[in-house]
Image: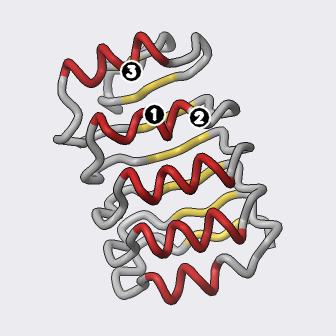
Amino acid sequence: LTDLDLSNGLDLGDAAAAEVAKARRLQRLSLSRCKRITDMGLGCIAVGCPDLRELSLKWCIGVTHLGLDLLALKCNKLNILDLSYTMIVKKCFPAIMKLQSLQVLLLVGCNGIDDDALTSLDQECSKSLQVIINPYLFHCEHCAS
């Protein structure tokens, strides 16, 4: 199993994430709208699925910098990370910046990310990272606003 889409699994939580983590060859995973997933579940996935290339945590409001720290430590092949509509804040950026293979970061609707945080991200991120904060105005440099 390399691709798994559990989007809209509103009742899926950390126990389900622990089961997903058993799919060690997983490369693409969507947990969009799995609002009961927390850092604990993300940690299980990070440890169990080190080959992840694409991960969508869109609307996973229980994910914080703690889960992202573990993700950055364990999933260094991650190319695309969707954190849209999550509760992340600037404090999450150091973990995200550790993802050396990251090419696309989606931050649409992240109310905890202000202009100051985006400026900080722009200064710290690699030239090849595309940051998307508005899906209707895409720009290929650091930040798409």
**Viewer-proximal residue, 80 or 134?**
80
- Rendered position, 87 above or below 109: below
Q: Amino acid at mark 2?
A: Lys
Q: Which mark is residue 94?
A: 1
Badge 2: how crowded within 10 Å, few (<14), some, or many (20+)? some
Q: Could you say where residue 24 lies in the image, as x and y percent from the top left?
A: 79, 71
Q: Could you say where residue 76 lies in the image, as x and y percent from the top left?
A: 71, 44
Query: For residue 2, what is the image quadrant?
Result: bottom right
Q: Amino acid at mark 1?
A: Pro
Q: Which residue is mark 3?
A: 121
Label 3 or label 2, whichever comes before in sequence order: 2
Q: Which residue is mark 2?
A: 98
Label 1 or label 3, whichever comes before in sequence order: 1
In this rendering, the label closer to the viewer, 1 or 3: 1
State the SS at label 1.
Answer: helix
Give the residue drawn at x 17%, y 41%. 111
State the SS at label 2.
Answer: loop
**Relative horizontal placement of residue 94, taking residue 61 as reference (left or right):** right
- Rendered position, 101 above or below 71: above
Give the residue drawn at x 48%, y 67%. 31
**Residues at discs 1 and 2 in contact (Cβ within 8 Å):** yes
